[in-house]
């Protein structure tokens, strides 16, 4: 691990446990049975620990969509050609993708980053952080050099820091890269030892023959390179993707800046696991938005120790599930700031020996 990444990792501190305790105490004074808002309450406590304040709000939020191509597409592992990566980046920049629609609804900014698209792109809204023109084919050679993987991590960190300097305090991870579920499965198996039959899924919708080929492809890459599961940068460089490494940097920087970071789907969670292996305290700043249809995603979330907020059978990526979870962050913040306490509302609490809720039994 180079000195710059090491400094970034060292700057990540644990969350504020006293703020978490104060937030829980406040929640238990609100006009409801304790714990009756379920995961919203756990989220409110987590946000307090992250911010160091019982009541938080996040008016400026951004989804960082990292885009990069994958040389492994030469093996025929995707239902879509590599050209779609650049075409979808243009779609993001023109506001026409699903993540743009959902981000507008959530009042979130979409930051589109070219970290490794195989063609040159020009657009005033594009953030250019290109490390190289796509990764190499991992079944023939390492996806990238270690230096390139480190540069991609730091590029992601720079994007997060720049957004923070403009007032952004809530981050969402997003990505685009044809072939990136293959790279993410390889990263997951490389970091955890979980078999490729559990990490590899259908991605963009490949058939049974395509799934078998994809599993074989990831097995070949792992056998060829034997990535060191105790060294996330080694794993990312040998079998990962530029956008996965970039998101790893976004997550680490968000944690260092004491900002919550909402993790999207399978690819984002592979990046989150790499970040967690580099800096275990970073997990305390992560919010798992949803669980996707990619079979490996459940295992990744379990490795991270995170509970997903939503179950919507989504498998699009882009940050779409993450952006939807912004509404839950807003809801948790508003519950803390606007809901009456038993005392302020003049409602008897369970400790008074009367009904625990003004609306009858908790359900």
Image (cartoon, rainbow, N blue to C red):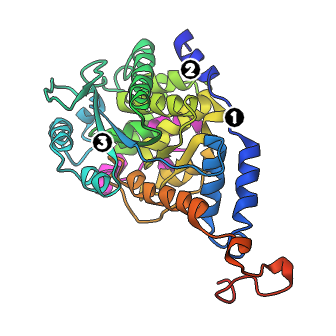
Secondary structure under tag 3 reads: strand
**Nearer-N-terminus badge (3/1):** 1
Q: Is residue 340 magenta?
A: no
Which of these two is toward me, 133 or 195?
133
Q: Residues within 10 Å of mark 1 (few under 14, many from 20)?
A: some
- Judge whether 93 appears above or below 239 on screen: below
The residue drawn where x is 62% and y is 29% is: 279
What is the CA distance from the residue labelled 3 to the residue labelled 2? Answer: 24 Å
Magenta residues (range): 186-213
96 left or right, relative to 270: left
Which of these two is toward me, 190 or 324?
324
- Judge whether 116 appears above or below 318 on screen: above
The residue drawn where x is 77% and y is 44% is: 18
- Judge whether 13 appears above or below 195 on screen: above
Residue 272 drawn at (x, y percent):
52, 38
What is the CA distance from the residue labelled 2 to the residue labelled 1? Answer: 14 Å
Q: Is residue 176 visible?
A: no
Q: Which residue is mark 1?
A: 14
**Nearer-N-terminus badge (2/1):** 2
- Quadrant assignment, res 52: top right
131 left or right, relative to 52: left
Residue 208's disc number? none
- Quadrant assignment, res 183: top left
165 left or right, relative to 20: left
- Judge whether 363 appears above or below 141 on screen: below
Q: Which residue is mark 3?
A: 110
Residue 263 drawn at (x, y percent):
47, 46
- For the C terminus, the image quarter is bottom right
Residue 57 drawn at (x, y percent):
51, 49
Q: Residues within 10 Å of mark 2 (few under 14, many from 20)?
A: some
Secondary structure under tag 2 reads: helix
Q: Which residue is mark 2?
A: 8
């Amino acid at each position: 691990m180079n000195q710059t990444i090491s400094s970034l990792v060292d700057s990540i501190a644990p969350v504020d446990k006293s703020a978490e305790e104060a937030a829980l105490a406040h929640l238990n004074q609100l006009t409801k049975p304790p714990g009756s808002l379920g995961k919203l309450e756990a989220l409110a406590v987590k946000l307090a620990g992250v911010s160091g304040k019982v009541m938080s709000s996040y008016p400026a939020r951004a989804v960082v969509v990292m885009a990069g191509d994958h040389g492994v597409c030469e093996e025929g592992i995707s239902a879509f050609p590599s050209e779609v990566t650049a075409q979808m980046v243009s779609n993001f920049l023109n506001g026409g993708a699903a993540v743009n629609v959902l981000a507008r609804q959530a009042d979130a900014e979409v930051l589109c980053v070219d970290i490794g698209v195989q063609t040159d792109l020009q657009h005033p809204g594009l953030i250019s952080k290109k490390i190289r023109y796509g990764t190499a084919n991992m079944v023939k050679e390492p996806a990238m050099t270690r230096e390139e993987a480190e540069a991609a991590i730091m590029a992601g960190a720079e994007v997060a820091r720049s957004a923070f300097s403009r007032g952004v305090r809530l981050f969402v991870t997003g990505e685009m890269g044809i072939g990136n579920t293959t790279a993410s499965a390889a990263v997951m198996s490389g970091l955890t030892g979980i078999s490729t039959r559990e990490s590899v899924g259908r991605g963009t919708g490949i058939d049974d023959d395509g799934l078998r080929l994809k599993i074989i492809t990831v097995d070949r890459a792992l056998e060829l390179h034997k990535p060191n599961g105790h060294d996330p940068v080694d794993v990312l460089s040998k079998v990962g993707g530029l956008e996965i490494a970039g998101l790893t940097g976004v997550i680490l920087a968000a944690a260092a800046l004491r900002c919550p970071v909402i993790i999207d789907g399978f690819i984002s969670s592979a990046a989150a696991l790499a970040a967690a292996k580099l800096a275990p305290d970073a997990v305390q700043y992560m919010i798992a938005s949803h669980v996707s249809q990619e079979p490996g995603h459940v295992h990744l979330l379990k490795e991270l120790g995170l509970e997903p907020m939503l179950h919507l059978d989504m498998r699009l990526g882009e940050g779409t599930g993450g952006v939807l979870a912004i509404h839950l962050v807003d809801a948790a913040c508003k519950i803390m700031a606007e809901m009456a306490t038993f005392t302020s509302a003049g409602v008897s609490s369970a400790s008074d020996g009367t009904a625990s809720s003004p609306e009858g039994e908790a359900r």
